[in-house]
Image: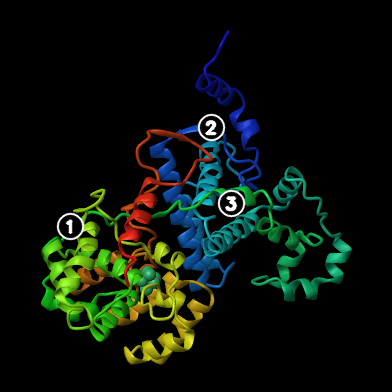
């Protein structure tokens, strides 16, 4: 008798799913999932894991890792998002499955560049470390055996002998606990193994641009921005990247193509109509070396293209932070990019000083930049420039920054006093568009990326 793949899978899952597929709540993600899942589930899993990793990142810079506050907040988020919490519940197959699949989806999305990979591995390691430390001795032993890590616990005698050293080298450990805990010979070395896992390499090589982020393609405020207000808005509500571009445009009456794309799509996202955009760019360019005729012939087409009125008539989406941070780094003479990522720290410091950011705030921002937490540095900049205790959102997009600032300034939202909640509900996997089911792994060369590359060609004139 023949079974379809789906029927076979269901039969298999019904029979052994809890016992065989996920015998432990903690995983080493050795094998990628092979089952078919719906697009909706794919998307939800990815968004939830991204939320979780964002919380891990936020907590990691706000609290001492491993402290009670850190642990209780992380526990709350893990429970809320329905990921496996401790290995005590036997019947948490769904949570374990979600943990497994979502990890691999984000591997795909976050393997496209060194920066992304580093961010992903760091958050996954912190999450893993937290969950590993929550296991009791028996479960640690079971887990290590399951993943073929032959690290033996040190004996009671050795533990007593090394008690002081163990105490000093283990953050957050009190004296009494040394006796209760198991210590493993060289255990810490198992964590970097995740980083050098050669199985990642094929994925890293074959995936290009899976992008996870908010969707700002819909112009909610079209026509609500007046050109006369842009200077004031750039100071009050633009993120640093756009403020920098706006200033460079005003100063030089020109922006090179990378800047025009990044800033032009941002302005479109905040509500500039095509007519306004044409007027805005033209009025500035003709103050410089470009005359009106050259503008109409050389630049107007690209702006109309930007608005989907030329070429393939694609409505182009403003760039997310990730795209700005990771692609097309600025060269000398360029003003695009993310200043937290691409500026020399000393220049960034000077810029922040000139924007009247207090010295302690500048130090905090530079620390975050040093730790490569560029979006968190930008969140701190938001907090300081908008004068709020806590910004109440997790930043992913320059247009999100603008929208949140405008909401604040118009009194449209209460500022939360709780630490930032991750990701807005607008997040979507923009690479997953038209199918209603998919398998993992997937190809990530998206239509949108191809179209964007097409658009790039229209902006090549400096
Ligand atoms: Fe712009 Fe995002 Fe960088 Fe902030 S983090 S400056 S919004 S690219």
Few, some or many residues within 10 Å of mark 2 (<14, 14–19, 20+): some
Q: Are marks 2 and 3 in contact (CB under 8 Å)?
A: no
Q: CA distance from mark 2 to mark 3?
A: 23 Å
- Of badges 1 and 3, nearer the viewer stands 3
| Residue drawn at (79%, 59%) of the image | 184
* Label 3 beta carbon less than 8 Å to ligand 1: no
Q: Is residue 306 visible?
A: yes
Few, some or many residues within 10 Å of mark 3 (<14, 14–19, 20+): few
Residue 220's disc is 1
Few, some or many residues within 10 Å of mark 1 (<14, 14–19, 20+): few
Q: Is residue 429 visible?
A: no
| Residue drawn at (72%, 69%) of the image | 176
Above/below status of 412 relative to 1: below
- The percent coordinates of residue 234 (x first, y second) are 23, 78
* Label 2 beta carbon less than 8 Å to ligand 1: no
Sequence order check, earlier mark of 2 and 3 = 2
Q: Is residue 361 found left or right of 410 in the rendered image?
A: right
- The percent coordinates of residue 139 (x first, y second) are 70, 48
Sequence order check, earlier mark of 1 and 3 = 3
* SS of the residue under disc 1: loop
**Quarter where residue 303 is shown:** bottom left
- The percent coordinates of residue 335 (x first, y second) are 36, 77
Sequence order check, earlier mark of 1 and 2 = 2
Q: Pick the residue in front: 286 or 376.
A: 286
Q: Which quarter holds ligand 1?
A: bottom left
| Residue drawn at (16%, 65%) of the image | 272
Residue 205's disc is 3
The residue to which callout 2 is attached is: 35
């Amino acid at each position: 008798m023949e079974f379809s793949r789906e029927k076979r899978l269901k039969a298999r899952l019904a029979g052994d799913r809890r016992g065989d597929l996920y015998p432990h709540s903690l995983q080493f993600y050795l094998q990628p999932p092979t089952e078919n899942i719906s697009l909706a589930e794919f998307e939800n899993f990815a968004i939830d894991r991204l939320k979780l990793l964002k919380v891990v990142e936020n907590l990691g810079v706000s609290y001492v890792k491993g402290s009670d506050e850190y642990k209780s907040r992380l526990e709350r988020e893990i429970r809320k998002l329905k990921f496996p919490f401790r290995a005590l519940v036997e019947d948490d197959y769904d949570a374990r499955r979600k943990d497994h699949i979502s990890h691999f989806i984000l591997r795909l999305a976050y393997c496209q560049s060194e920066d992304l990979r580093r961010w992903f591995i760091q958050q996954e390691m912190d999450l893993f470390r937290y969950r590993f430390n929550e296991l009791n001795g028996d479960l640690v032993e079971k887990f290590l055996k399951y993943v073929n890590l032959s690290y033996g616990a040190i004996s009671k005698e050795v533990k007593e002998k090394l008690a002081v050293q163990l105490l000093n080298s283990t953050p957050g450990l009190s004296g009494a606990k040394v006796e209760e805990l198991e210590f493993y010979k060289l255990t810490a070395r198992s964590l970097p193994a995740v980083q050098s896992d050669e199985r990642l390499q094929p994925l890293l090589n074959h995936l290009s641009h899976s992008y996870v982020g908010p969707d700002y393609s819909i112009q909610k405020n079209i026509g609500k921005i007046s050109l006369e207000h842009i200077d004031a808005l750039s100071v009050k509500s633009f993120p640093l990247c756009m403020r920098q571009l706006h200033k460079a445009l005003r100063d030089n009456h020109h922006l090179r193509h990378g800047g025009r794309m990044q800033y032009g799509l941002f302005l479109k996202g905040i509500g500039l109509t095509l007519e306004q955009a044409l007027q805005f760019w033209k009025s500035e360019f003709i103050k410089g070396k470009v005359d009106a005729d050259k503008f109409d012939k050389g630049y107007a087409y690209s702006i109309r293209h930007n608005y989907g009125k030329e070429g393939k008539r694609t409505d182009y989406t403003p760039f997310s932070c990730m795209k700005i941070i990771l692609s097309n780094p600025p060269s000398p003479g360029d003003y695009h990019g993310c200043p937290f990522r691409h500026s020399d720290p000393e220049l960034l410091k000077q810029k922040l000083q000139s924007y009247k950011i207090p010295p302690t705030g500048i130090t905090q921002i530079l620390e975050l930049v040093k730790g490569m937490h560029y979006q968190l540095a930008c969140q701190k900049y938001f907090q300081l420039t908008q004068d709020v205790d806590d910004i109440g959102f997790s930043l992913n997009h320059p247009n999100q920054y603008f929208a949140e600032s405008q909401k604040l300034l118009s009194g449209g939202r209460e500022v939360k006093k709780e630490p930032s909640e991750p990701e807005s509900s607008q997040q979507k996997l923009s690479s997953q568009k038209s199918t209603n089911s998919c398998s993992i792994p997937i190809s990530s060369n998206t239509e949108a990326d191809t179209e964007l590359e097409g658009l790039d060609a229209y902006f090549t004139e400096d």
